[in-house]
Image (cartoon, rainbow, N blue to C red):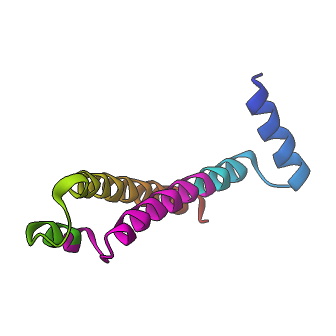
């Protein structure tokens, strides 16, 4: 038996929960943590340009309010973060619907 599997079994037993419930809760907290990280990174980028959204960052670039470089690259990073957040939300929803968490 793998070490991680033994840990799961022991912790579930120690806390009086099923292994499935413990695993679901662990996955849920992991995904929520990753989502918080993505949201924090997105907020940090937006605050750098003093704009509330990616759309407004793009508008600021187009009208010349902010320099094109590195703001276009940051805009792309924001788009990627938004996609990752959507994926994380989907997986969080999947786990919540399965486990009733």
Determine the image quadrant of residue 88. bottom left
As drawn, the residue found furthest toward the left would be 63
* Left or right of 59 on screen, residue 38: right
Please report the residue visible at 87 percent of the width from the left and 55 percent of the height from the top. 15
Please report the residue visible at 42 percent of the width from the left and 68 percent of the height from the top. 43
* Left or right of 90 on screen, residue 27: right
Instruction: List x then y, in percent, for residue 4.
Output: 74, 32
Please report the residue visible at 62 percent of the width from the left and 57 percent of the height from the top. 29
Q: Which residues are magenta?
A: 29-56
Q: Pick whichever, 96 or 68, lies toward us.
A: 68
Question: Can I make out residue 66 in this image?
Answer: yes
Q: Does residue 83 show up magenta in the picture?
A: no
Determine the image quadrant of residue 56. bottom left
Instruction: List x then y, in percent, for residue 70.
Output: 25, 53
Q: Pick whichever, 40 or 5, lies toward us.
A: 40
* Left or right of 11 on screen, residue 50: left
Instruction: List x then y, in percent, for residue 82.
Output: 33, 59
Determine whether 4 is above or below 54 in the image: above
């Amino acid at each position: 038996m793998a070490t991680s599997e033994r840990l799961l079994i022991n912790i579930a037993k120690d806390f009086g929960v099923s292994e499935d419930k413990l695993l679901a809760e662990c996955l849920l907290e992991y995904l929520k943590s990753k989502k918080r990280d993505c949201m924090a990174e997105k907020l940090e980028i937006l605050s750098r340009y003093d704009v509330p959204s990616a759309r407004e960052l793009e508008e600021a670039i187009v009208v010349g309010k902010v320099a094109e470089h590195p703001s276009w690259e940051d805009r792309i990073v924001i788009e990627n973060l938004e996609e990752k957040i959507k994926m994380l939300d989907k997986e969080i929803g999947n786990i919540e619907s399965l486990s009733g968490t």
